[in-house]
Amino acid sequence: MLEYASYALVLFSLAMYVVLDGYDLGVGMLSLAARPERRREYGEIVATAWDANESWIILAGVVLWAGLPGAYAVILPSVYLPLIGMLIAVILRGLGLEMQSAADGYRRGWALLFGGASLAATVCQGLVLGALLTGPSQRDGMFQGGAFDWFSRYSVLCALGLVAVYLLAGAAWLQDKTEGWSRSGIRRTGRSLLVVTAIMTAVLGLLMPSADPQQSQLSQPLRAVLFWLAVLAAVAAGAVAWYGFGRRPDWRPFAAVATMTACGLVGLAVLSVPVVVPPALTVHQVASPHSSQLFLVVGVGLCMPFVLAYNAYAWRSFRGKYTDPVERPIPPPPARTFPLGVSPAPSGALRTIVRRTLLVALGILATAVSQDVFGGVADWIDPVGVVVLCCASLAAWIVGDRRDRRAGYFHADLVGIEAETTS
């Protein structure tokens, strides 16, 4: 039964990612159509919790790799290209978001990078979902297809459907967090996206029997009851979202859209369990040994409350409507002066280069030998050596911080406050 616990952890992590990161991807896409003065506001809203939201997909990948390695071995090579595209888009999205947040005022290039990368990441995720639903080509638990098997008409429709879902979640989140939209504008945008989402869901559901190689399991009474209960719950949540757009309380549409999304994911899980990779690769066939399952379930089970607490803390800290913070610019660090006729020695820059080079070398060395150490081989170095490397890196870090403190870099805020008070 432990393999089902691992599978449940994967599904739960993916559901949390879709519900949480879906809205900030939707906000990013909506920023492409927003007025320039609103794009920075959208980015600041997403910046409060986007890294916490994306931690769930990392958790899902770790559990899939360690708990269901047979599925990981088939799924990953079948969707290499869209996954790589998604990772690149996520990196560029974070770059645009952080650079826009750090800039003084609005920067069109960074804002467009944030929005475009959000759209690219969503499309890539939809292509991956479509490839999984149509079933990767496999034989004896090994992928046997080509590099572009993930591209099909159904996967393109899945990408469009996921874009609609994320846009809907983003619109609901903006109603909860902003004051800039008029009530009529919120109602019109939200309801239009809700209609598009419902149409795409219906189209994908009708085409799934012809695209999915797995035989339908709705002939089983329990499975059919659970599936239609999930559908009815999703329809009810959609009705609540339709009524809530443009009306108070502002949190109601987002709660309804999140419930609707979760019900859709539950419906997909009910249709497929115990099959992990269509058409017939089951949980039992792809699971790792019992000892690995036990270690994984206990380890991830202990980590998951901390991830949930991280999300809850971020939501609580930034609850309420967004307000543009008034930030005081940080003054430059104080300049170091030298006696007349004495030039600064280049030893400081040389020490910095040497220190950073050693830190990089130590990190690479620790990474290179970690597999041997924790695999029980220890051909290059034993665990004591790893401890020595970590302590050396920590010591170099502390020494560098102390040097920067003596140079005055950590007193920039105090210097600025003193300058303001004296002036």
Image: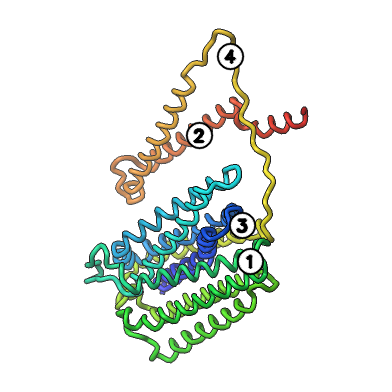
Badge 3 marks a residue whose secondary structure is helix
Badge 3 crowding class, 10 Å Cα cut-off, few under 14, some 14 to 19, many 20 or more, is some
Q: Amino acid at mark 4?
A: Phe
Q: Nearer the viewer, mark 3 or mark 2?
A: 3
363 vs 6: above or below:
above
Between 73 and 78, the residue placed more toward the observer is 78
Q: Which residue is mark 4?
A: 338
Q: Residue at x 44, y 32 (%)?
A: 356
For the residues carrying marks 4 and 2, which lies nearer the camera in this image?
4
Q: Mark 1 highlights which residue?
A: 175
Q: Element at badge 4?
A: loop
Which amino acid, mark 1? Gln
Q: Secondary structure at mark 2?
A: helix
Q: Residue 148: where, in percent of width, then height?
A: 27, 64
Mark 4 neighbour class, 10 Å CA radius: few under 14, some 14 to 19, many 20 or more: few
Please give the label number shown on residue 397: 2
Q: CA distance from mark 3 to mark 4?
A: 46 Å
Disc 3 vs disc 4: which is toward the camera?
4
Q: Earlier in the sequence, mark 4 or mark 2?
A: 4
Name the residue beneath numbered marker 3: 314
